[in-house]
Amino acid sequence: MSEYLTKYFNSITLNEATSVYDDSLLTVVSANGYYSDGTVTRYQTDGVLGLNLICTTCVSYPCTSGITISMVNVGRFDLKTTFGSAIGAIKVTIPNVTLEPVGIQLLKDSIPYDVKFSSTNSVSSGEISAPIVNELSLFSSGSTPVCSDYNFSSISLPTYAYDGSDWVTDNVLSTIPLLNKRAAYWYTELDDLILYIPKTSTTDFTLNTIVLSICGSDAQATPISIGCPVVLPSVPVSNIEQNSANACQNNDYEFTYYVGYVSGSTVGGDTRISVNDFIFNDENGEVKRADGFYGVAKTNLYGGTNPSYPYGFIQVENGVVIQIGSCT
């Protein structure tokens, strides 16, 4: 049984609060961790309360051919997924992130999981994340969101749970913090956001995916998808180098790494790496590759052919390919 302590928060109820404090003057922020009043349970990170984990009794659904979340209404959508004994990388895709803001939090066996995406838009190269990566994260494109509600620090939304065939709600409102936002930029759209979650053993876990639809336009007509575990494609590369010139000279591709496709694909049985793809040490997507430059056969680059000098390179940052190039 949990021990109840005296804590303070900056609202009438824990459900509506944004932070928990140790003192009545609200000057000492409480430590990171879970806080509950017996009904509401929320996780605080660096003084910011996350979502109320109100879907603890939701049914978990096995991933057989992938599961989707269709944000047909304004609200919070909770989905629990299990994966059986399968081993591999689980691909999570949020499609069409434009002016319509979307929020997401992932919990792996109730523990917040880092929300670090990559984008299919090559202009938005590199890792895409909100300031606090293991909390509810909010994303949009463009300098002006499509609804004024997104500008506030919190919003009250109904919660929808999946009953096996449809999304249903009890119409009880939940207060949602809107503080952890990735800054939007007017000059580009994020398009699809993609990340990979590793499943490295036959022991199953439950993935709780919490999604927010805030403004209610048709921009999110395409559902969010949660794939089943699959082994990632491999690619031979060189040792790590400090620059592209050294990577081009190092064409002894003695190492094997693995690609989490974002914009790349398998063509004719060949792994084709593109900007914004993930590069992992292992086929399950658990460990991202170290920052640096790597030599790679040009046939393994997106759009690559096999010219008389068939060498290329990739640059990796935070586990994401931020540059590809041909050696000349």
Image (cartoon, rainbow, N blue to C red):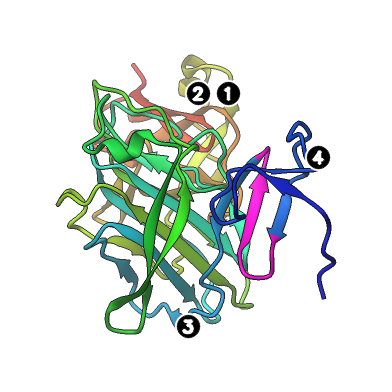
The residue to which callout 4 is attached is 23
195 on left or right of 53: left
163 in magenta? no
Q: Can residue 283 be seen in this view?
A: no
- What's the magenta region? 36-47
Marking on residue 247: 2
Q: Are marks 1 and 3 in contact (CB under 8 Å)?
A: no
| Distance between the alpha carbons at the discs numbered 3 and 4 | 38 Å
Position of the C terminus by quadrant: top left
Q: Is mark 3 on a helix, strand or loop?
A: loop
Q: Residues within 10 Å of mark 2 (few under 14, many from 20)?
A: many
Q: Work out which residue is located at the far left of the displayed protein and give it.
A: 218
116 on left or right of 301: right
Marking on residue 59: 3
Q: What element carries label 1?
A: strand
Q: Is residue 231 visible?
A: yes
At a point 47% along the width and 15% down the height, the residue shown is 245
The residue to which callout 1 is attached is 241
Q: Give, as a three-letter code, the residue at label 4.
A: Asp
Of tags 4 and 1, the one toward the viewer is: 4
Res 223 quadrant in image = bottom left
